[in-house]
Image (spheres, helix red, strand yellow):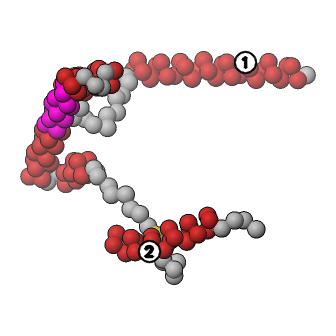
Amino acid sequence: MNSLNINQEETIDAKWKAVKDAIKTATVTVIGKQNRTKKPWFNNSCKEAFNRRKESRTQMLNNPYNREKVMAYKECQKEANNILRYEKRKYTKDVLEEAEIDHKVNRTRQLYQKINSIKGGYKKHEKFLKNDDGSLVTEQDKSLVYSEPNIESISKAQSTPFP
């Protein structure tokens, strides 16, 4: 009886896998595979510069005492950073020009979508500490004052042996 259930489960799993694969292949052929890019400004010139920098880095790491390879890596690094920065600025400029056109034509939703897509960059990592009252200290200067006693109490607790 148990072997019959196991064989039935295996066949159900195999049938489900076949249906699932058929659906996936049909969607890829009909809709196509969509590429999501985190960095839409990253194009072929950026990729080539990145690969040159990566190759130069591996050569430098293979022989780190060779000054020529170190200097070549630093040059490739500067070149790659300049290309990446240029492409990102060009993309940002184009998006802002499109946003300006959206503003002139009163397409407010598209305007804010474009602004928010650019604006979502650097987010500062916040560090919070609790003071003696149990309330959170969020300001940088005050957190330094409160962190010193906490560090001392932690070091004292680690130095005392367990009973």
**Which stretch appears magenta?**
71-86
Secondary-structure class at tag 1: helix
Q: Please report the residue visible at 81 percent of the width from the left and 22 percent of the height from the top.
A: 6
Q: Secondary structure at mark 2?
A: helix
> Where does label 1 land, which residue?
11
Asked if residue 67 shows in the view, the reply is yes
Q: Main secondary structure of the magenta part?
A: helix
* Label 1 – label 2 distance at C-alpha: 64 Å
**Residue 91 in picture, x, y percent from top left:** 16, 38
Q: In this orientation, which residue lies closer to the viewer: 12 or 47?
A: 47
Q: Tell me the residue at 45%/70% (across/down).
A: 147
**For the point 23% across and 48% down, which residue is it?**
118
Quadrant holding the N terminus: top right
User: Picture quarter containing residue 40?
Assistant: top left
- Of residues 97 and 120, the one nearer the viewer is 120
Specify whether residue 54 is in view: no
Q: Mark 2: which amino acid?
A: Tyr
The amino acid type, in three-letter code, at marker 1 is Thr
- The label number, if any, that marks residue 146 in the structure image: 2
Q: From the viewer's perspective, tell me whether residue 131 is left or right of residue 94.
A: right
Give the class, few, some or many, for how many residues have Cα within 10 Å of label 1's Cα (few <14, many ≥20): few
> Which of the 4 quarters of the picture holds residue 85?
top left
* Residue 129 location (% of width, % of height): 46, 69
Q: Is residue 11 above or below residue 46?
A: above
Foreground pick, 155 / 30: 155
Q: Mark 2, residues whose alpha carbon is within 10 Å: few (<14), some, or many (≥20)? A: some
Residue 150 lies, with reference to residue 21, above or below; the image says below
